Amino acid sequence: MLPGIPEIWLPRTEDLDHHRRRVHKVLTDLAPDIVEASSWEAETLHYARRPRRYRAPVVVRGDLSASTMEAFDHLVVAEKELLGLADAVLAVSEFAVTYGIPRPVVATNSGEPVVCEFASPDTAQAAQEEL
């Protein structure tokens, strides 16, 4: 634990809808400035479904692709929806293309390439101009 930064642990459950509702409640109560989460199991899906004016920006990190991992269909559907709702998608591989989102923009992070898909062409253009 880092000093001054609270940690909130949610017990693991196999009921993903229940877990997503609990994550939604915690995030709503915390009112963070930004939310970053993995795409796997779409834990932030319920929160990301909120109208943009009632939630923080959601950044989804594509660690694995339920589609390419041949996971259960409900995980593939949820992950695809979350990627579509996210304000930005960060990927470390070509996984995002499996969901039909635009080919990500490449940005650098500590000298290592990171793949990033922005919510709008204007945002992507602005990011490329800064590089």
Image: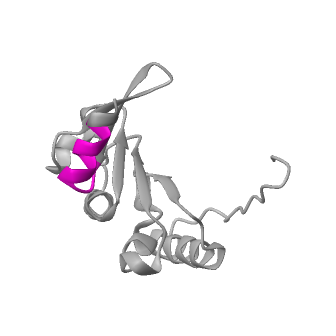
Q: Quadrant of residue 48?
A: bottom left
State the quadrant of the C terminus.
top left
Q: Within the magenta stretch, is there residue 120?
A: yes
Residue 36 screen position, x and y as percent:
50, 54
Q: Quadrant of residue 8?
A: bottom right
Q: Is residue 107 visible?
A: yes
Judge by depth and name the residue closer to the eye, 10 or 32: 32
Q: Is residue 89 left or right of residue 101?
A: right
Vertical comparison of 107 with 41: above or below: above
Residue shown at 18% from the left, 43% from the top: 98
Q: Within the magenta stretch, is there residue 72?
A: no
Residue shown at 75% from the left, 58% from the top: 7
Q: Is residue 105 left or right of residue 33?
A: left
Q: Is residue 11 left or right of residue 24?
A: right
Residue shown at 60% from the left, 73% from the top: 31
What is the chief secondary structure element of the magenta stretch? helix
Vertical comparison of 92 with 37: above or below: above
Residue shown at 44% from the left, 63% from the top: 57
**Which segment is the magenta one?**
118-128
Residue 105 screen position, x and y as percent:
25, 36
